[in-house]
Image (cartoon, grey):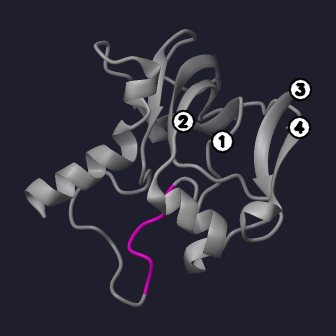
């Protein structure tokens, strides 16, 4: 069993720390023990208003994690048990122009469109993770997914 923050509605009052079963990874997924989570302003907005996203309750918020791989699915390559990883903020957007327009969500994020990472363990597709930089602590590395994407936008877009 593990602890996971879940919302059954909008607002901080709807946020509760629940005990649930540790998830099992499917063939293309990785089970990660969450070591550190960075909360950003967007996470707060999702909790308070949902930001118009299609949240499915109970919903776990949070988008940025650093943790350690504890199990992999049978089809996973590139990660092994013990690897330190961080989440990818927009897992479906790998390269090229950002999808979407002013009327449609431009991209789908963890802790928004997809369930988030405020839990002791999370399961996600292996392609939604990258190796944690060796020079950073888990606490520092957990800030990279959103902050790194924001910095990239400032420099490139």
Instruction: Tell which circle, 1 or 4, labels the residue nearer the N-terminal end.
Output: 4
Instruction: Tell which circle, 2 or 3, labels the residue nearer the N-terminal end.
Output: 3
Q: Is residue 105 magenta?
A: yes
Labels 1 & 4 near each other (Cβ < 8 A): no
Q: Quadrant of residue 132?
A: top left
The CA span between labels 3 and 4 is 6 Å
Mark 3 residue element: loop
Residue under label 2, please give it. 37
Circle 2 packing at 10 Å, graded few (<14), some (14-19), many (20+), is many
Q: Residue furthest front?
A: 13
Mark 1 residue element: loop
Q: Residue furthest bottom?
A: 103
Residue under label 3, please give it. 1
Instruction: Tell which circle, 3 or 4, labels the residue nearer the N-terminal end.
Output: 3
Residue under label 1, please give it. 118
Q: Position of residue 150 (x, y in %)?
A: 26, 54
Total labels: the figure holds 4
Q: Residue at x 71, y 52 (%)?
A: 60
Is 44 placed left or right of 18 in the picture? left
Labels 3 & 4 near each other (Cβ < 8 A): yes
Is 45 placed left or right of 102 in the picture? right
The CA span between labels 1 and 2 is 7 Å
Instruction: Tell which circle, 3 or 1, labels the residue nearer the N-terminal end.
Output: 3
User: In which quadrant of the rendered image does the N terminus lie?
Assistant: top right
* Magenta segment, prevailing SS (helix, strand or loop): loop
Residue under label 4, please give it. 20
Q: Position of residue 157 (x, y in %)?
A: 13, 64
Q: Quadrant of residue 25?
A: top right
Q: Residue furthest left?
A: 155
Q: Residue at x 40, y 17 (%)?
A: 137
Q: Nearer the viewer, residue 143 or 121?
A: 143
Is residue 112 in sight in this rendering?
no
């Amino acid at each position: 069993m593990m602890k996971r923050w879940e919302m059954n509605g909008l607002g901080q009052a709807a946020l509760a720390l629940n005990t649930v079963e540790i998830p099992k990874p499917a063939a293309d997924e990785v089970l990660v023990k969450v070591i550190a989570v960075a909360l950003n302003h967007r996470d707060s907005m999702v909790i308070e208003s949902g930001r118009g996203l299609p949240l499915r309750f109970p919903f776990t918020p949070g988008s940025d994690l650093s943790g350690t791989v504890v199990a992999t699915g049978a089809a996973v390559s590139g990660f092994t048990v013990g690897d330190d990883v961080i989440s990818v903020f927009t897992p479906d957007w790998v390269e090229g122009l950002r999808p979407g327009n002013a009327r449609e969500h431009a991209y789908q994020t963890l802790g928004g469109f997809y369930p988030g990472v405020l839990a002791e363990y999370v399961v996600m597709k292996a392609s939604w993770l990258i190796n944690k930089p060796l020079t950073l602590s888990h606490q520092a590395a957990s800030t990279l997914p959103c902050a790194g994407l924001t910095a990239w936008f400032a420099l490139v877009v």
